[in-house]
Image: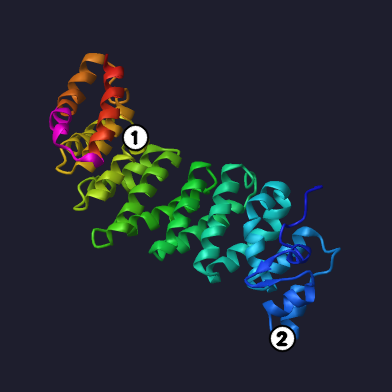
Amino acid sequence: PGAAPLACTMEDFLDVDFGDVKTKNEASVVAKLTKSDAEIESLVVPDDTPELDRQALFLTNGQKVQRDCVIANLARTLRTYRHEAVAKLLPILTERIPGMDTSQQAKAADALVEATAEGALGGEADAGDRLTALAAKLLAKGGSASEPWLRVLVALLKHRLVPKRALRETVLELALKKADPSAEAEARMTASILFGQIAAAADNSSLVTSTFLEPAIALCQDTEADVRAAMCAQVEAIARGVGAAVAKQRVLPELLELLRDEQPLVRAAAVEAAVETYDFWEHNVSRRRHLLLPALKGVVETSVNLGSDGAAALAAEEAELARRVA
C-alpha cells in the first residue's frame, strides 16, 4: 500500500528533541542515545528497507526508542497493512511484549484494542489465538500492569475473535480461577467482567449453565460491594446466555436481591441492570410489572438517603424505568 512510512524512522530523529539535545546531525543524536559502535549500528536501517521489515527489525533487535516508535504507530500499521502486518509483526509482538516494560505493554494493548475495534485483525486465522493467549497470560499476573490486557481480551471477545477452543480452555479457565473466593477483590471483579463477555460470546446456553453460572451467582453475593456492582453490569449478558427459563429461576432472584443491597453503589448498578433487562424477564406486561416493580419501588423509597455517588445514577435510571413501564 502507498502508506506513509513509520513516523519514527531515523529521518524523524533529525528533528527530535532528546532532553537538552537538539541537533540536525543524525550521528550526534545516535551518539547521545547510545554508547557503543554496535548500538549505533543497530539503530541504522537502510533507507530502502520495506516498512514492515523495518518495524520487524526494530521489534526484534532495535533499541527501546525504536520499539517505542513501532508501538506508537502499531494501530495505524495494522489498519494500513492488515494481513501483511498481522503475518509479519504479530508473531514478534506476542513473543516480545511480555518482556517489555509496563508502559510499552500498556501502549501496545491500547493499539491492539483500537485495531480490533477497527476490524484490522478480522479474518486472520491465528490472530485471535495468538492475542488471546498473550492477553490471558499477562492478565493472569494481576496488578495494575494487567489491566490493559483485560481490555484486549474484552475487545477480542466482543468482536468474536476468540476461537471456541480458546474460549473454553484459556479465557473461561482464567475467569474461574479469578472468581475463587480466596482471590483478591480485583481478581473477582475481573472474573465478573469475563463471565459477562463469555456469556455474550458463547454460542450455546449449556456452556454458561454448566460451567460458570453458579460461580457468577456467587459473585453477586460477594463480600465486596465493588464486585457485586460489577456483576450487576453482567446480569443481562448472563441472563440471555442461559436463556429465559433458567435466567428467571436463577438470575432474577439475584437481581432482586441486589436491588435491596445495603450499598448505594450496588443498588444504583442493580437499577441500571433492571432497566436494561426489564423487557426480558416476562413478555406479559402485568406479570412483568409484578416481578420487578415492588423491588424497584423499594429502591426509589430509599434513594432519598443515598449519597452523591448513587443518587444521580438512580435518578437517571428511575426516569428511564418510568418511561418504559408507562
Q: Considering depth in this image, is 85 or 114 the residue closer to the camera? A: 114
Measure the alpha-carbon separation of dots 2 and 1.
59 Å
Asked whether, in this view, residue 147 is left or right of residue 124, the answer is left
Question: Which quadrant of the view contains residue 72?
Answer: bottom right
The residue under the point 34% across, 52% down is 191
Residue 204 against residue 88 in the figure, above or below: above
Q: Amino acid at mark 2?
A: Ser
Q: Nearer the viewer, residue 315 or 3?
A: 315
Residue 287, by quadrant, is top left
Name the one closer to the observer, 297 or 4: 4
Residue 186 point in image, percent of width and height: 32, 58
Label 1: which residue?
236
Q: Is residue 61 magenta?
A: no
| Element under disc 2 | loop
Say above or below: 56 vs 155: below
Q: Amino acid at mark 1?
A: Glu
Query: Which of the two labelled residues, at mark 2 and mark 1, occupies the earlier sequence position?
Result: 2
Q: Nearer the viewer, mark 2 or mark 1?
A: 2
The span picked out in magenta is 298-309
Say which quadrant the C terminus sits in. top left
Residue appearing at x 52%, y 42% in the figure: 160
* Residue that mark 2 sits on: 36
Is-magenta flag for residue 303?
yes
Query: Could you tell whether 28 is left or right of 301 in the image?
Result: right
